[in-house]
């Protein structure tokens, strides 16, 4: 098991690090709940970008990635942290 921040750092360092289609789908479903279609489409486009183009943020270390999919280790407020993750993915 690894986390999304490690994958992003590996990709920026030129190491092979990607999310498979199922992991991308899990991540999209997790962060796009209660979003409008336009936002979901933007998130889907950003999630499909190579990880080397993502910003490395500490909050991404709470997103665990394994063969079963993607999970999030919540700190305090699920909704607030999902909003922050959406903003990080959308590079706001």
Image (cartoon, rainbow, N blue to C red):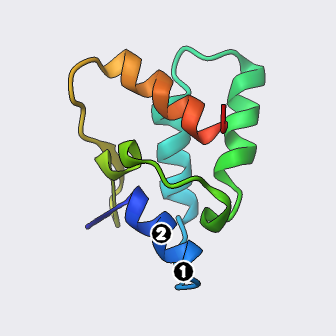
**Residue 48 location in percent, x, y?**
69, 55
Does 77 sit left or right of 86 as displayed? left
Q: Secondary structure at mark 1?
A: loop
Asked if labels 2 and 1 touch by Cβ distance under 8 angstroms, the answer is yes
Q: Is disc 2 surrounded by few (<14), some (14 to 19) or many (20+) residues within 10 Å? A: some
Q: Residue furthest bottom?
A: 15
**Residue 40 location in percent, x, y?**
68, 29
Quarter of the C terminus within the rendering: top right
Q: Count numbered badges in the picture.
A: 2
Does 28 sit left or right of 79 as displayed? right
Vertical position of residue 37 compared to residue 43: above or below: above
The residue under the point 33% across, 52% down is 61
Does 1 sit left or right of 25 as displayed? left
**Residue 64 location in percent, x, y?**
31, 54
Q: Which mark is residue 92?
A: none
Quarter of the N terminus within the rendering: bottom left
What separation in Å lies between label 1 and label 2 (alpha carbons)? 6 Å
Mark 2, residue position: 9
Vertical position of residue 87 compared to residue 15: above or below: above
Mark 1, residue position: 13
The residue under the point 56% across, 27% down is 32
Q: Is disc 1 surrounded by few (<14), some (14 to 19) or many (20+) residues within 10 Å? A: few
**Residue 62 location in percent, x, y?**
30, 46
Vertical position of residue 45 compared to residue 34: above or below: below
The residue under the point 47% across, 76% down is 10
Q: Secondary structure at mark 2?
A: helix
The residue under the point 61% across, 55% down is 54
């Amino acid at each position: 098991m690894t986390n999304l921040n490690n994958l992003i750092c590996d990709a920026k360092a030129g190491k092979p690090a990607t999310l498979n289609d199922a992991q991308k789908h899990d991540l999209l479903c997790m962060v796009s709940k209660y979003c409008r279609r336009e936002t979901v489409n933007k998130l889907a486009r950003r999630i499909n970008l190579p990880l080397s183009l993502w910003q490395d943020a500490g909050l991404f270390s709470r997103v665990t990635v394994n063969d079963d999919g993607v999970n999030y280790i919540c700190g305090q407020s699920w909704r607030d942290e999902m909003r922050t993750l959406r903003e990080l993915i959308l590079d706001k």
